[in-house]
Image (tube, helix red, strand yellow):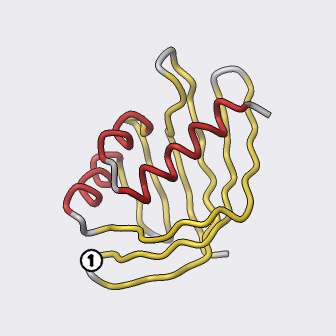
Amino acid sequence: MDQTLIDAEHRLQTAQLTGDVGALDRLLDDRLRFTFGESVATKADDLAAHRSGSQTLTSLVEEELAVFADGPTGVTWFLGRLEGSVNGAPFAARLRYTRTWHRSPSGWRVVAAHASYA
C-alpha cells in the first residue's frame, strides 16, 4: 500500500468537497478523462463546474478505499456516499469511483476516472 497515493486520494476528496479549484488543478492531469454514464468530461470541464458552482458537494463520506501502486502508476477504488447539487438540482448517491493516477516528480495526478452508482 502506498501512503502517498492514499494521501493524494484524500486531498482530492477534500478538494472536491470544498470546491478548491487550485487543489483540483494540481491533482488532475491535463489529459484527464472522466466517464460517468454516457458522458465523458475533461479536466477543463471539471474545473469549470467547480469554479462556476454548477457542481457542489455538501457531504462526502468514504466507506471503503483500496489502492494499488506500481512505479509511476496507481489506482484507487473509492466507495462512498455523496450529497450536493448539479445545475441546482440536489442529489444524494452512493457511488463507486475508480481512478488511475500517474506519479510525476510533482506528485500523484489523476489521468482517468470512472464513476458508477453502487
Q: Is residue 61 left or right of residue 107?
A: right
Residue 42, placed above or below residue 59: above
Which residue appears farthest toward the left when viewing the image? 52
Which residue appears farthest toward the top when viewing the image? 105
Question: Residue 38 location in percent, x, y?
Answer: 46, 70
* Nearer-the-camera pick, 47 or 61: 61
Question: Residue 46 location in percent, x, y?
Answer: 33, 54
Secondary structure at numbered mark 1: loop
Residue in the image at 42% along x and 49% along y:
15
Which residue appears farthest toward the right when viewing the image? 1
Q: Quadrant of residue 39?
A: bottom left
Question: Residue 60 location in percent, x, y?
Answer: 54, 66
Residue in the image at 56% along x and 29% along y:
102
Residue in the image at 70% along x and 20% along y:
71
Residue 48, placed above or below residue 74: below
Three-letter residue code for mark 1: Asn
Residue in the image at 30% along x and 40% along y:
22
Residue 99, placed above or below residue 116: above
